[in-house]
């Protein structure tokens, strides 16, 4: 029997690791992305501004000195199939539905309009996200995994912060 669960902007929690700390010291990550990651790491478990998902990205970009349109264009638009994705890139979800099976249970997640920061790159399509206004962490910044291979509907855009 399949169990179905609809989660609005909710994620499975994961903790900080030595590997994630090492990521913040990586020489391959663009310098602006490193500034964004430093800000994010200082805010994990805390509420940023009003606690909306967008607030985390907005404040990170502002404090890092990035140039952006103050709406939903967070820098240079990347192509997932062609560009290297780095921690500190911003991901925007629009009308997204995900479906995956974990421990024999089928999960359905929906993100009608959600903004997150890529905190860790696990593979070409799998990331750890830093975000707030989720079912898991509420209005506080939390970390959670996502695999874009489970995307069933909707669209994502990934942006590289720019000066």
Image: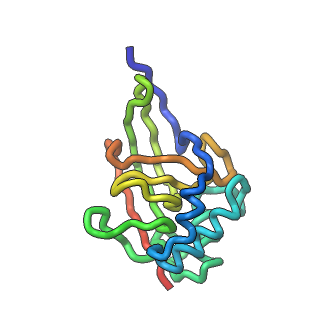
Outermost top residue: 1
- Name above or below for residue 85 compared with residue 67: above
Image side of residue 142 versus residue 149, left or right: right
Q: How is the image coloured?
A: rainbow
Q: Nearer the viewer, residue 140 or 120?
A: 120
Outermost left residue: 82
Residue 105 position by quadrant: top left
Instruction: Kindly identify the residue that appears in the image at 59 percent across and 52 percent down.
Output: 17
In percent of width and height, residue 112 lies at: 46, 48
Q: Nearer the viewer, residue 37 or 9?
A: 37
Image side of residue 37 versus residue 3, left or right: right
In percent of width and height, residue 120 lies at: 49, 58
- Name above or below for residue 94 compared with residue 66: above
Image side of residue 102 versus residue 21, left or right: left
Outermost bottom residue: 163
- Name above or below for residue 11 compared with residue 45: above
Q: Quadrant of the N terminus?
A: top left
Q: Nearer the viewer, residue 87 or 49?
A: 87
Instruction: Kindly identify the residue that appears in the image at 26 percent across and 68 percent down.
Output: 82
Instruction: Kindly identify the residue that appears in the image at 56 percent across and 64 percent down.
Output: 22
In percent of width and height, residue 142 lies at: 62, 51
Instruction: Kindly identify the residue that appears in the image at 43 percent across and 67 percent down.
Output: 86
Image side of residue 42 versus residue 4, left or right: right
For the image shown, how many numbered marks are present on the structure?
0
In percent of width and height, residue 42 lies at: 70, 64
């Amino acid at each position: 029997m399949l169990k179905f669960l609809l989660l609005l902007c909710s994620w499975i929690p994961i903790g900080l690791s030595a590997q994630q700390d090492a990521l913040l010291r990586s020489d391959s990550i663009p310098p602006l992305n490193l500034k964004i990651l430093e800000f994010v790491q200082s805010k994990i478990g805390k509420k940023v501004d009003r606690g909306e998902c967008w607030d985390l990205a907005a404040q990170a970009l502002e404090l890092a000195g990035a140039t952006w349109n103050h709406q939903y264009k967070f820098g240079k638009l990347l192509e997932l199939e062609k560009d290297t994705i780095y921690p500190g890139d911003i991901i925007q979800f629009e009308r997204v539905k995900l479906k995956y099976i974990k421990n024999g249970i089928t999960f359905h997640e929906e993100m009608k309009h959600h903004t997150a920061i890529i905190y860790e790159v696990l593979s070409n399509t799998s990331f750890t996200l830093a975000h707030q206004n989720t079912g898991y962490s509420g209005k506080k910044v939390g970390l959670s995994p996502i695999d874009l291979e489970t995307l069933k509907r909707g669209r994502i855009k990934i942006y590289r912060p720019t000066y």
